[in-house]
Image (tube, rainbow, N blue to C red):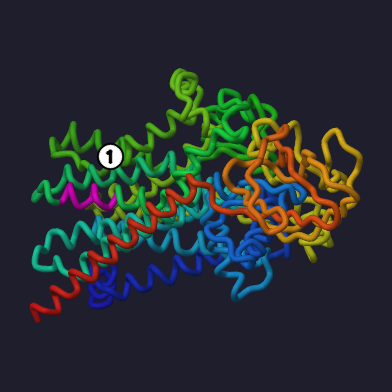
């Protein structure tokens, strides 16, 4: 009897169980990440391209270029603005890890393995803030870890979406903490404002983690904040203004990426060509209930699919149990329904709806939706919502026997249902990865499907056989080239004075090239079918030096200042609050 009392006391209210839960989730995360380290390199859809981009990012930052925008060694040294348009967070984090671990492949695998550890732990901590129930929170963290879609992101696709799903629980945890601090009005001091600033930084990291995932998950964050206001008994306009400030601050602070991504998109093919027809990739109800695990791609129609679109057996049980619980509570017991169970259940069912062809009406009429390419991306939202739903459902069950029965059933099925999802596929030729920078064919590729971030006028990507310098309507020139990732110099030997038009084998992008001719600035730049042309350039007899350097475009510079300005304002706020608090002491 004493042992039982101690056990339940620890299980329900003791801090030891919190530490134990974190330890268990930590080791379960390690267990789920073990497949990443079975082989030096694993075969995934996009992994090779991310390795290539990190190699370029390392070289670019060594040359003093920051923030990341132009990948000068990609597109076979013609360059391509990949960092300007796609989720730069993974490359910034890889750069930091590369200071310690010099192997790029290892850096990326470490980031992926952290997603299995940090995401579930913070999901558990966040749910405990919301439910005050250790067991229910542990179940939520467990189901967030053992979610087929998250294994799909790492072991099949190696998509940086896994970073978004890692950061989301961290962000939700600190948002909940902020709401709790707001309830204690005597704690509105420097610590509160520093926490607010930290939430903004997390939102910024969240916003630059993955373009498509953010379109789906940022509305979830906003809905969560609105739902918190809805259930807040002490709601005030001041609270609403504070969270509006946090959201706006995160948008302006991340505008160094978001601004150019939107306003410079018109210069490239992105969005102007139909890379993937979203209407061809709806999974069936049968597929999201049960589909065979595979490492291939998503194919048009049902029969050709070589990857799994399963939501998860345990996740389906949570939805069924939640519906039964609400029906029982409302019909038989006539009790007030738990708003959070309704919130997460509706979000689960709504995201499942948008995964299926039943929602094709909305996909046909919404460009934002179709830009997501694959309706099955909503499986990530469903999995998140179901994991949160499981905790609120379990919290509402008062019968201890039923509580532990559901807890153990979901843990067991969640684990067994994902046991085959932890395996990595080895690469066919490991030698290409031993020295990736020299041996792998993807190292200097454009690293995009259909080369859709090339200039709109480009007919195709570059290749190493292309002549670097061409004099249009002119005899071949005698020249030599020396170059780095994002700068270089051409030395031309002239036998007489003349004006010529030169085409350089560099991808054209307006506003980013600073050209020098014999130590003087040259401004006659043109777009020649997607390549950089120097129009009517005067070459004097003898040695002529033409230099080029990648710089920030006017649009990029503007948004850099917006981000820096926001950061400066927050620094002033923190300094002011700190000085005021110090003076009052």
Kindly identify the residue that appears in the image at 16 percent across and 69 percent down: 189
Please state which of residues 494 and 112 is positioned toward the viewer in this rendering: 494
- Residue 512 placement, left or right of 141: right
Query: Which percent across, then down, holds residue 406?
Result: 36, 50
Kindly identify the residue that appears in the image at 91 percent across and 39 percent down: 475
Please state which of residues 258 and 386 is positioned toward the viewer in this rendering: 258
Q: Quadrant of residue 461?
A: top right
Kindly identify the residue that appears in the image at 32 percent across and 70 percent down: 18
Q: Please identify the quadrant where the C terminus is shown.
A: bottom left
Query: Which percent across, then down, holds residue 11?
Result: 29, 68
Q: Please identify the quadrant where the N terminus is shown.
A: bottom left
Local SS, label 1: helix
**Prevailing secondary structure class for the magenta stretch in the rendered image:** helix
Please state which of residues 135 and 235 is positioned toward the viewer in this rendering: 235
Please state which of residues 166 and 60 is positioned toward the viewer in this rendering: 60
Query: Which percent across, then down, holds residue 244?
Result: 24, 47
- Label total for image: 1
Query: Which percent across, then down, holds residue 447?
Result: 69, 46
Residue under pointer 1: 343
Residue 127 among those drawn in magenta: no
Q: Which residues are magenta?
A: 239-247
Q: Quadrant of residue 269?
A: top right
Res 60 seen here: yes
């Amino acid at each position: 009897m004493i042992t039982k009392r101690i056990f339940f006391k620890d299980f329900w209210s003791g801090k030891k169980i919190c530490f134990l839960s974190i330890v268990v989730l930590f080791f379960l995360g390690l267990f789920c990440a073990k497949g990443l380290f079975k082989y030096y390199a694993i075969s995934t859809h996009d992994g090779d391209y991310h390795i290539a981009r990190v190699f370029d990012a390392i070289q670019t930052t060594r040359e003093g270029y920051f923030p990341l925008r132009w990948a000068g060694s990609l597109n076979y040294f013609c360059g391509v603005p990949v960092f300007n348009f796609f989720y730069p967070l993974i490359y910034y984090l890889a750069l930091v890890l590369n200071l310690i671990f010099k192997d790029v492949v290892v850096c990326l695998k470490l980031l992926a393995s952290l997603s299995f550890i940090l995401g579930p732990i913070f999901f558990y901590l966040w749910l405990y803030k919301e439910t005050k129930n250790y067991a229910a929170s542990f179940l939520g963290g467990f189901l967030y870890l053992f979610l087929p879609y998250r294994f799909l992101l790492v072991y099949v696709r190696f998509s940086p979406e896994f970073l978004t799903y890692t950061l989301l629980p961290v962000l939700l945890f600190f948002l909940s903490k902020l709401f709790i601090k707001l309830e204690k009005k005597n704690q509105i001091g420097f610590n509160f404002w520093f926490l607010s600033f930290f939430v903004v930084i997390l939102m910024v990291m969240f916003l630059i983690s993955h373009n498509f995932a953010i379109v789906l998950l940022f509305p979830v964050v906003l809905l969560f904040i609105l739902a918190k206001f809805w259930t807040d008994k002490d709601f005030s306009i001041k609270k609403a203004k504070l969270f509006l400030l946090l959201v706006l601050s995160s948008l302006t602070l991340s505008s160094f990426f978001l601004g150019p991504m939107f306003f410079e998109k018109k210069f490239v093919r992105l969005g102007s060509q139909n890379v993937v027809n979203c209407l061809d990739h709806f999974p069936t109800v049968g597929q999201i209930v049960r589909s065979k695990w595979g490492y291939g791609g998503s194919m048009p129609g049902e029969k050709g699919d070589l990857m799994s679109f399963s939501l998860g057996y345990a996740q389906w049980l949570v939805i069924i149990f939640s519906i039964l619980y609400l029906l029982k509570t409302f019909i038989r017991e006539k009790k007030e329904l738990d708003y959070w169970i309704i919130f997460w259940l509706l979000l689960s069912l709504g995201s499942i709806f948008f995964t299926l062809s039943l929602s094709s009406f909305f996909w046909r009429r919404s460009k934002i939706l179709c830009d997501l390419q694959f309706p099955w991306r909503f499986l990530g939202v469903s999995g998140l919502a179901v994991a949160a739903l499981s905790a609120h459902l379990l919290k509402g069950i008062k019968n201890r026997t039923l509580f532990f029965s559901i807890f153990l059933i979901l843990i067991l099925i969640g684990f067994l249902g994902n046991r085959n999802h932890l395996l990595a596929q080895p690469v066919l030729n490991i030698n290409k990865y031993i020295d990736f920078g020299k041996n792998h064919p993807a190292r200097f590729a454009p690293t995009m499907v259909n080369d859709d971030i090339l200039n709109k006028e480009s007919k195709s990507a570059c290749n190493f056989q292309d002549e670097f310098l061409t004099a249009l309507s002119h005899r071949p020139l005698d020249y030599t080239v020396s170059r780095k990732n994002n700068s270089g110099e051409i030395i031309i030997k002239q036998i007489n004075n003349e004006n010529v038009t030169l085409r350089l084998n560099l991808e054209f992008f307006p506003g980013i090239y600073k050209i020098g001719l014999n130590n003087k600035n040259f401004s006659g730049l043109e777009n020649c079918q997607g390549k950089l042309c120097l129009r009517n350039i005067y070459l004097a007899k003898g040695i002529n030096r033409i230099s080029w350097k990648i710089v920030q475009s006017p649009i990029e510079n503007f948004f850099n200042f917006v981000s820096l300005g926001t950061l400066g304002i927050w620094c002033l706020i923190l300094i002011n609050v700190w000085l005021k608090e110090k003076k009052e002491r």
